[in-house]
Image: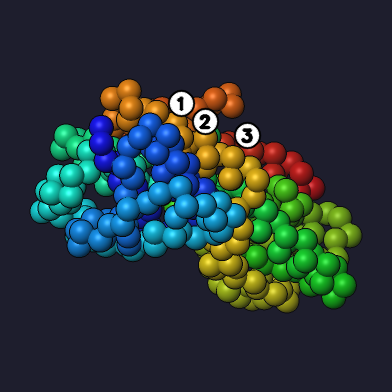
């Protein structure tokens, strides 16, 4: 193996740069030429690559976002787009590709691998929603960012005795809402997997759960119910005035936590180790604090499920 490419695709996540650094420096350790593909899979279709060395990735560990940039394109999901991508990889003499990204990016990685091109996927998404993977790069940083906002909002909510609704990321899954809600002491958590619980949560907020509660913190994942809609329901059905904060892209930015930097570094290095040993078509992750790999085909044959025990815990602690 003489040349390995690395790219980031989809929504950015803190720690992507740490993963890029680890992939590049691990490849250089094995005397392999390393190249970065700019602008995700679109850059692969456009043949936008640059040679990477130890110096070019020397000051990126602490930076959020991705120095390779990311671009979401529909073309790569088509048969023609994937055939063109593989043709370009061979034309550019890239022997293997490491893809850092979320569910959509890793799904494309699976498709390229199934077509015979050597690929390794590294999970990086603040949603932490990859089947079988305990923790994705970026989740811990986003979680701490959300908790910081919750703590700040709770200060002003208690001062004015007003209920606050905080809308966090989570289009299809509520992991970020669930974990941040528990860590931030939220009285109610609304996630896409439990949309049917919205009415019971409304009843809980309206009744104050039998306690002399002066205010509530409600965490909602964006894919469950819009914060502004929940606010309107509370006002209409219970006369409760609440404040809505939509965190949006503030959850994605910022310097990655030490946990995410270490996770990204370990997974990036392990991805190169797998390629060196001809293990391809894999997704890397951690289990029992050790790097492990999963077949990409196996990963995407599963459905991601929320941790039911965590959800039950959130209900118990909201009393």
Q: Residue at x 13, y 49 (%)?
A: 91
Q: Residue at x 71, y 74 (%)?
A: 242
What residue is pinned by disc 1?
A: 292
Q: Earlier in the sequence, mark 2 or mark 1?
A: 2
In this orientation, which residue lies closer to the viewer: 30 or 77? 30
Contact? badges 2 and 1 (CB < 8 Å): yes
Q: Is residue 240 above or below residue 253?
A: below
Q: Residue 131 has which mark?
A: none
Q: Earlier in the sequence, mark 1 or mark 3?
A: 1
What residue is pinned by disc 2?
A: 286
State left or right for residue 158 relative to residue 186. Answer: right
For marks 1 and 3, give the CA distance.
Answer: 24 Å
Residue 149 on image: x %, y %: 71, 64
Residue 144 on image: x %, y %: 67, 53
In this orientation, which residue lies closer to the viewer: 88 or 289? 88
Q: Residues within 10 Å of mark 2 (few under 14, many from 20)?
A: some
Count of labels in the image: 3
Secondary structure of the residue carrying numbered label 2: strand
Q: Is residue 20 above or below residue 147?
A: above
State left or right for residue 113 relative to residue 305. Answer: left
Nearest to viewer (mark 3 / mark 2): 2
For marks 2 and 1, give the CA distance.
Answer: 6 Å
Q: Quadrant of the N terminus?
A: top left
Nearest to viewer (mark 1 / mark 3): 1
What residue is pinned by disc 3?
A: 309
For marks 3 and 2, give the CA distance.
Answer: 21 Å
Residue 140 on image: x %, y %: 61, 47
State left or right for residue 13 relative to residue 311. Answer: left
């Amino acid at each position: 193996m003489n040349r390995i490419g690395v790219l980031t695709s989809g929504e950015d996540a803190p720690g992507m740069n740490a993963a890029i650094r680890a992939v590049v420096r691990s490849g250089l350790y094995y005397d392999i030429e390393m190249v970065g593909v700019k602008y995700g899979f679109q850059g692969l279709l456009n043949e936008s690559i640059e040679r990477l060395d130890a110096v070019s990735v020397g000051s990126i560990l602490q930076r959020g976002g991705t120095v390779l940039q990311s671009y979401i394109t529909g073309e790569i999901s088509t048969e023609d787009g994937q055939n063109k991508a593989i043709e370009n990889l061979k034309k550019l003499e890239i022997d293997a590709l490491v893809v850092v990204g979320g569910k959509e990016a890793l799904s494309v990685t699976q498709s390229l691998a199934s077509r015979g091109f050597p690929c390794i996927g590294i999970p990086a998404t603040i949603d932490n929603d990859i089947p079988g993977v305990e923790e994705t790069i970026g989740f811990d940083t986003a979680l701490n960012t959300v908790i910081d906002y919750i703590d700040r909002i709770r200060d002003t909510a208690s001062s004015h005795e007003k209920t606050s609704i905080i809308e966090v990321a989570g289009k299809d899954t509520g992991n970020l809402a669930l974990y941040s809600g528990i860590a931030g002491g939220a009285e109610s958590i609304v996630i896409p997997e439990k949309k049917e619980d919205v009415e019971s949560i409304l009843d809980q907020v309206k009744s104050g759960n039998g306690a002399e509660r002066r205010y509530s913190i409600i965490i909602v994942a964006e894919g469950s119910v819009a914060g502004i809609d929940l606010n309107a329901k509370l006002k209409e059905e219970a006369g409760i005035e609440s404040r809505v904060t939509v965190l949006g892209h503030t959850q994605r930015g910022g310097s990655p936590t030490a946990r995410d930097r270490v996770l990204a570094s370990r997974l990036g290095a392990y991805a190169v180790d797998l390629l060196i040993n001809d293990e391809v078509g894999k997704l890397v992750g951690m289990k029992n604090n050790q790097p492990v790999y999963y077949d990409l085909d196996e990963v995407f044959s599963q459905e991601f499920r929320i941790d039911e025990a965590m959800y039950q815990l959130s209900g118990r602690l909201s009393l």
